[in-house]
Amino acid sequence: MITVLRESDAPLSDGEFARLLDNSLRAQGIHAPCAVTLTLTDEASIRDVNRAHRGVDRPTDVLSFPAALLPARPGAPLPPSMWDSGAGAFFLGDIVISCPRALAQAKEYGHPPEREFSYLFVHGVFHLLGYDHQNEEERHLMRKKEEEALGGPDGALAEAAFKAREAAYVPYSGYRVGAALRDRAGRVFTGCNVENVSYGLTNCAERTALFKAVSEGAREFDAIAIAAEGTAPWPCGACRQVLSEFAPGLRVLVAWEGGREETTLEALLPHSFLRFEGDKEHGQ
Ligand code: THU
């Protein structure tokens, strides 16, 4: 949920800013409704705001005013004090962008104006979410989150799957597979295929990722990305069954050099076997 005050021209629509806000929140594992106010203004006005609120008498590209101090940690709960009952959302704070400055920076860096406005807005959102760049470690963490939000959380998940593929142990097939499984708190668990001389004891990348996640305490999942080469690496039947134990509604993204496709586990494993009544009492 975003309120955009346009005092100066910007190349992104309200809907595009809203999508960037959603991507940022998902990258942070926040699923609750959140609201932000964005003011798109000029050099003189951002200078006034900078002077009035920060005592800095000069224009800048973006300013953020968090409604509360949040820990820069995915999945951290939002404090009830941030809840705005009128809006029906957690109010995160205000962001101000200087449009002339953003346009000048886009030219300077040689990328489209849309890219610069997207970056500045996402940067502002992560400041509202508690991120900062006072030292190298903080800067790196914030940058990673920004990239995730700009490429979309699914883009980051596919990238993590490609990266996990590098560790594949495949002396028999030579076919490398990587998987990245994201839980509802935004944590990502990766895995690769681990083959065995017996062949049959080989573990697929998807199950490696799932077993790592479950053994770290994760139970609810949102999406899995699977990366390989040649053709779309749809998960095998055994992996579909094992994934459905924890995440029947999981989104399944497959990626290879030639493209990407997306479906759900439900579509890949219809009419799956569910726990029967007598089994439920055995607990989690
Ligand atoms: N493999 C996976 O990692 N995931 C699948 O869903 C299908 C197959 C691996 C297992 C084996 O190491 C190789 O691909 C060739 O079957």
Image (spheres, grey):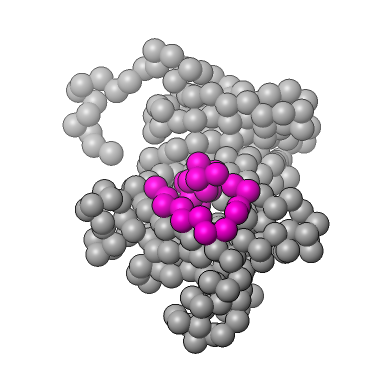
Q: Which residues are magenta?
A: 1-24
In the figure, is residue 219 to the left or right of 260?
Answer: left
12 inside magenta stretch:
yes
* Outermost residue toward the top in this view: 271
Q: Quadrant of the C terminus?
A: top left
Give the image location of residue 182, x and y in percent.
Answer: 49, 43
Give the image location of residue 16, x and y in percent.
Answer: 54, 43
13 inside magenta stretch:
yes
In the figure, is residue 102 to the left or right of 70?
Answer: right
Name the residue rendered at 66%, 63% in the picture.
Answer: 100
Name the residue rendered at 57%, 58% in the picture.
Answer: 8
Give the total number of marks visible in the rendering.
0
Q: Is residue 58 above or below residue 236?
A: below
In the figure, is residue 133 to the left or right of 2?
Answer: right
> Is there any visible trace of residue 279 in the rendered image?
yes
> Is there any visible trace of residue 188 in the rendered image?
no
